[in-house]
């Protein structure tokens, strides 16, 4: 079961962006690619990324809501970011970045 806060964040990621936030087609396309890559991640990784970056939740808040320590949340975020980067590189949509 997905926590309601995480669910709301996931739904927000799939909402169309206003033009003022994505003024050009290339930027809009990058957002679409990132959203597709995020959707392809395992649920727990997608949840922590959504809670942290889309909702701006603190590590403590994420940990409390998911029943994890802050240290465990940090580890899950690290693995989730690595998986997201790998997903983006597989599609060839991300330049070599460190």
Image (tube, rainbow, N blue to C red):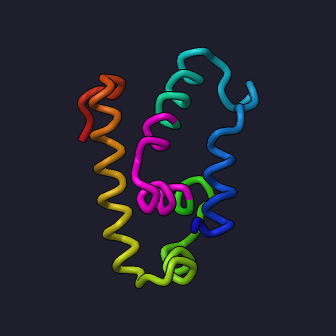
- Residue 46 in the figure: left or right of residue 5: left
Looking at the image, which residue is at 65% across and 26% down? 22
- Residue 30 in the figure: left or right of residue 19: left
Looking at the image, which residue is at 71% across and 32% down? 16
Count of numbered circles on the image: 0
Quadrant (top left, top right, bottom left, bottom right) of the N terminus: bottom right
Give how far across and how far down residue 15 sits, in percent: 70, 38
Task: Examine the image and state in which quarter residue 95 appears.
Answer: top left
Residue 98 vertical position relative to residue 31 in the rendered view, above or below: below
Give how far across and how far down residue 79 sits, in percent: 30, 59
Q: Which span is picked out in magenta? A: 36-50
Task: Between residue 8 and residue 98, name the one nearer to us.
Answer: 8
Residue 30 vertical position relative to residue 7 in the rendered view, above or below: above
Looking at the image, which residue is at 35% across and 80% down? 71
Give how far across and how far down residue 55 sits, in percent: 63, 59
Task: Examine the image and state in which quarter residue 78 appears.
Answer: bottom left
Give how far across and how far down residue 76 sits, in percent: 35, 66
- Residue 73 on the magenta span: no
Task: Between residue 55 and residue 9, name the one nearer to us.
Answer: 9
Is the magenta region chiefly helix, strand or loop? helix
Residue 90 vertical position relative to residue 98 in the rendered view, above or below: above
């Amino acid at each position: 079961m997905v926590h309601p806060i995480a669910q709301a964040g996931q739904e927000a990621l799939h909402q169309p962006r206003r033009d003022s936030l994505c003024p050009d087609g290339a930027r809009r396309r990058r957002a679409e690619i990132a959203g597709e890559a995020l959707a392809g991640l395992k649920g727990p990784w997608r949840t922590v990324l959504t809670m942290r970056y889309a909702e701006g939740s603190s590590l403590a808040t994420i940990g409390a809501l998911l029943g994890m320590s802050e240290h465990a949340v940090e580890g899950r975020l690290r693995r989730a970011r690595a998986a997201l980067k790998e997903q983006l590189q597989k599609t060839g949509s991300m330049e070599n970045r460190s």
